[in-house]
Amino acid sequence: LILLDSLLQEMPHNFPPLQNDRLLRAARGEEVDRAPVWVMRQAGRYLPEFRKVRVEQDFFTICQTPELACEITLQPIRRFPLDAAIIFSDILVIPQALGMIVEMKPGVGPVFDKPLVVPEDMDKLVVPDVKVALKYVYDAITLTRHKLEGKVPLIGFTGAPWTLMAYMVEGGGSKTYSKSKKWLYAHPEASKKLLSMVAGVCVDYLVEQARAGAQLLQVFESNAEYLGPEQFKTFSLPYLLQINKQVKERLVEQQLDLVPMTVFAKGGHYALDQLANSGYETVGLDWTITPSLARKVVGDRVTLQGNFDPPALYSSVEDIDTAVKKMCEEFGTQRWIANLGHGIYPDMDPDHLGAFIAAVHKYSMVKPE
């Protein structure tokens, strides 16, 4: 670790030149020769090489060890012709930085030791110095930028405030998120106070990721589907807007490169028009909306990302090819980043992801005039 620290201090920003900027051009609305493609959770359990590392290491130990996080991030890049890497981490590092204990339990998922039950529990949270508390993420990003050797851009990310609050109150995943939604109705002011606190940490966290070398930043509002339009407008959208605005302001103030930003509100297609006006360059879509309808709503205001149904990768290779062809025809070749509509499943055959990527390459290529 001492060796890593000295390495990072010596060459934090002498990054190798980027050879493939297709993702960044698409995000900015610039012309591309074909749609860039990457996949949520592309570094993960479906890869045998990941499972080999995971047998020996606890999940959060991997996140907190820059060399391991870097290795996991690079695994899918070695295996597939992807257009981006996404740093291996987890949205729940923020609750951990706020002083909450979170464990990843096999077969269960994340479990919080002491979730927030009543508003008074917020007093136990400690607003961290994000530069210190999450330094391991920035170290992993800087190391990975060097190890990528400019092959593809590196994506950094955070969970959005409502999604993080929901985990912090529920104490883990939930089918209904009724405890956290109860807060929104029974304790609206306390909920806003918590969301505001978390949003501030998200801003600091994303700015530091960009400083460390992240070239695009994604905000995951994974629990948008549990909110209706009014609740989204009150308890999600203001904080998504705050994050986008303040991150960009800070990057300019600190003379750092402006990086494109993506918002992915899973199940939030009811708010697609608002998201297209939110200032984010790219809006992620899940599989529950047709690409043509989404494009009709957003027009050319933003780039769209998505939205292949993750279980469709269980299909035969031939059926994957046919389905991707249809998706490419609907999205077109420009202002689109090909992806799944959510994360890839842990039991997926990697060869089927390979077929998905190959089909995107084949069917989204710009045809010569």
Image (cartoon, grey):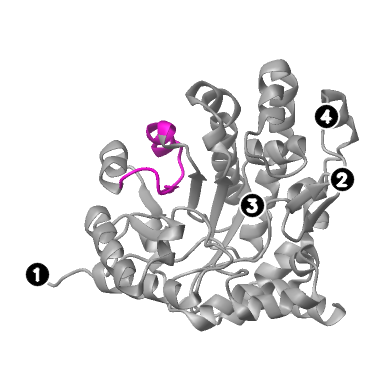
User: Which residue is labeled 1 in the image?
Assistant: 369
Q: Secondary structure at mark 4?
A: loop
49 or 320, which is in the foreground?
320
Pointer 3 with pointer 1, Cβ within 8 A: no
Q: Position of residue 198 (x, y in %)?
A: 72, 38
Quadrant of the rendering where the C terminus is positioned = bottom left
Per the model, the C-alpha gap separating discs 4 and 2 is 12 Å
Figure quadrant of residue 163: top right
* Magenta-colored span: 270-290
Q: Secondary structure at mark 3?
A: helix
Per the model, the C-alpha gap separating discs 2 and 3 is 26 Å
Mark 2 neighbour density, 10 Å: few (under 14) some (14–19) many (20 or more):
few
Q: Residue at x 42, y 62 (%)?
A: 24
Seen from this angle, which residue lies furthest left? 369
Q: Is residue 208 above or below residue 143?
A: above
Pointer 1 with pointer 4, Cβ within 8 A: no
Q: Amino acid at mark 2?
A: Asp
Per the model, the C-alpha gap separating discs 1 and 4 is 61 Å
Task: Return the disc, 1 or 4, that comes first in the chain's sequence.
Answer: 4
Per the model, the C-alpha gap separating discs 3 and 4 is 28 Å
Q: Amino acid at mark 4?
A: Val
Q: Residue at x 83, y 82 (%)?
A: 3
